[in-house]
Image (cartoon, grey):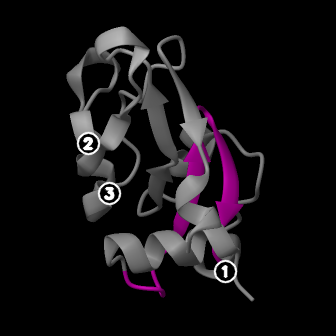
């Protein structure tokens, strides 16, 4: 079986399975599909290093939760489009690959809920 998180992201984003895809958490990669592995990409590799090795790599960041709603209400990074320096999360999810501006880890935390419910 290909990396499960990568399979979930292929289904969720519509990126073709033959295209190299990695699931990113902050700066590192936590799941890499077979197509990306064939290009030399491995888990725990830094996203920028992987992108330099394989420019066509799609890096999809895991969901990020923020507690910036009223009275500490949790909001989702994708739903609110919040990324540091204004880059929208859905740009990654549409197959744009690694963006220069990633979710701001000082303001949010990752959630793996989408993989638990897949």
Does any portion of residue 72 appear in the rendered image? yes
For disc 2, the marked residue is 79
Q: Earlier in the sequence, mark 1 or mark 3?
A: 1
Res. 117 image quadrant: bottom right
Instruction: State the CA–CA distance, disc 1 to disc 3.
Output: 19 Å
* Left or right relative to 50: residue 100: left
- Single out the residue that lies furthest toward the front: 71
User: Compared with residue 43, is residue 15 higher up or lower down, i.e. above or below?
Assistant: below
For disc 3, the marked residue is 93
Closer to us: 25 or 42? 25
Q: In the rendered structure, are the residues bearing label 1 and label 3 in contact, judged by CB atoms less than 8 Å apart? A: no
At a point 48% along the width and 87% down the height, the residue shown is 18
Q: In the rendered structure, are the residues bearing label 2 and label 3 in contact, judged by CB atoms less than 8 Å apart? A: no
Q: Which span of residues is magenta-colored?
A: 16-33
Q: Earlier in the sequence, mark 2 or mark 1?
A: 1
Indicate yes or no whether the magenta region holds residue 103. Answer: no
Residue 10 % position (x, y): 45, 76
User: Compared with residue 89, is residue 74 higher up or lower down, i.e. above or below?
Assistant: above
For disc 1, the marked residue is 34
Mark 2 or mark 3, which is nearer to you?
2
Does any portion of residue 88 appear in the rendered image? no
Closer to us: 53 or 43? 43
């Amino acid at each position: 079986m290909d990396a499960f998180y990568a399979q979930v992201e292929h289904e969720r984003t519509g990126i073709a399975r033959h295209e190299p895809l990695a699931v990113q958490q902050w700066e590192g990669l936590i799941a890499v599909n077979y197509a990306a592995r064939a290009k030399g990409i491995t888990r725990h590799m830094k996203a920028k290093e992987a992108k330099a090795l394989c420019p066509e790599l799609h890096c999809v960041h895991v969901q990020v939760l923020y507690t910036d709603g009223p009275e500490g209400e949790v909001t989702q990074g994708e739903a609110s489009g919040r990324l540091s320096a204004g880059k929208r999360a859905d740009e990654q999810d549409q197959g744009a690959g690694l963006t220069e501006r990633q979710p701001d880890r000082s303001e949010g935390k990752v959630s793996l809920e989408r993989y638990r419910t897949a």
